[in-house]
Image: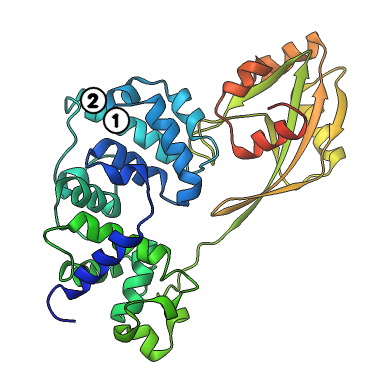
Amino acid sequence: MEGKTFAKRLINWYTERKRNLPWRKTKDPYPVWLSEIILQQTRVEQGLPYWERFVDAFPTVHDLANAKEEKVLRLWQGLGYYSRARNLHATARHISNELNGVFPTTYNEILKLKGIGPYTAAAIASICFDEPAPVVDGNVFRFASRYFGIKEDISKAGSRKVFENTLKAEISEEQPGTFNQAMMEFGATTCSPSPSCNECLFQPECYAWDKGIQKSLPIKTGKTKVRDRHFNYVVFKQNERFYLNERDTKDVWGGLFDFFLIEGALGEEEVLQKLSLDLNLEEPFLEEVTEQVLHILSHQKIHARFYLICLDEHDAKRAAEKTTLKPYSIEEMLNLPKPKLIVNYLQRIGIK
């Protein structure tokens, strides 16, 4: 298509059909940045209430910077990819303390912030500061590859530059932020994995439609290997107090709280035997063992079983001495940041 006709048609489509989302009503980089980080790996429908809770709890970047990490992780609970929350918090502190609360205004400067990659930097730079930096996310990869006929393998690092260069020639200089949001919106709706080609205004010029290869684009050959893990959670309870510890930051759910964990594909007898050897408990009472539940993450499948064990005062003290476990009341436990797997278990036993 000649000139910027593609951009004009796309922006017109977006203006008429865009979803009414609160972060689209401002050019303030703080709420826009929050939305972009929350919506990484997260659908809008799921992310919106989280964004609202964050803006309510932390109205400014200074409020987020001054918050305790535990509170930030607690609000993030259920979104997964908890490194996003930690990076968000660290960047808020940097902006608040080192930059006097002023967000960087260019793509290159925004890209230097912790937890911000090329896509997020381009989104903020274009939406908030009108810099014509094209965004490339999963939705844009799909739409652009189909429409322009780009056959680069998107699992390879160098392919992003090909897409960016193509879109630099098309992006609206006057409305770069609107163009970028329109690209993402079109890829998320009309040009979805199962595209609505008959409703697409770009159908006549679409490369994939012409060749009948919509389902073949974008090309992605590299697949992430999924790892199976077996978690045997021992839920120690003494009176109305539960024992939890903070997870290692180098493993999945780092920094969140969970129960005593014995990892491995073990049967009930093996778990109890290992528990006895490791902690040397004298009179533990096994109250319940759950059926195995499957908890799926992007790169891992967690096969989990929960063992609810009641302890007397002596065994509770011994468990605390031999581990990093600490006792929490039910109210305290509910306020701790926890993996969704743990939250689901607590809800199942009536603790909400």
Rendered location of residue 37, percent (x, y):
37, 44
Q: Which residue is mark 2?
A: 96
Do the numbered discs 1 and 2 sit on residues whose CB atoms are within 8 Å?
yes
Report the amino acid beneath label 1.
Ala
Residue closer to the observer: 336 or 140 = 140
Q: Which element is circle 2 on?
A: helix
Residue 317 position by quadrant: top right
Marks 1/2: CA distance? 6 Å
Number of the label disc, if any, that sits on residue 156: none
Q: Is residue 94 left or right of residue 69?
A: left
Residue at left offset 68%, top offset 20%? 243
Number of the label disc, if any, that sits on residue 92: 1
Rendered location of residue 293, percent (x, y):
74, 47
Residue 51 position by quadrant: top left
Question: Quick one: which residue is furthest to the front in this view?
Answer: 16
Residue at left offset 68%, top offset 33%? 261
Report the amino acid beneath label 2.
Ser
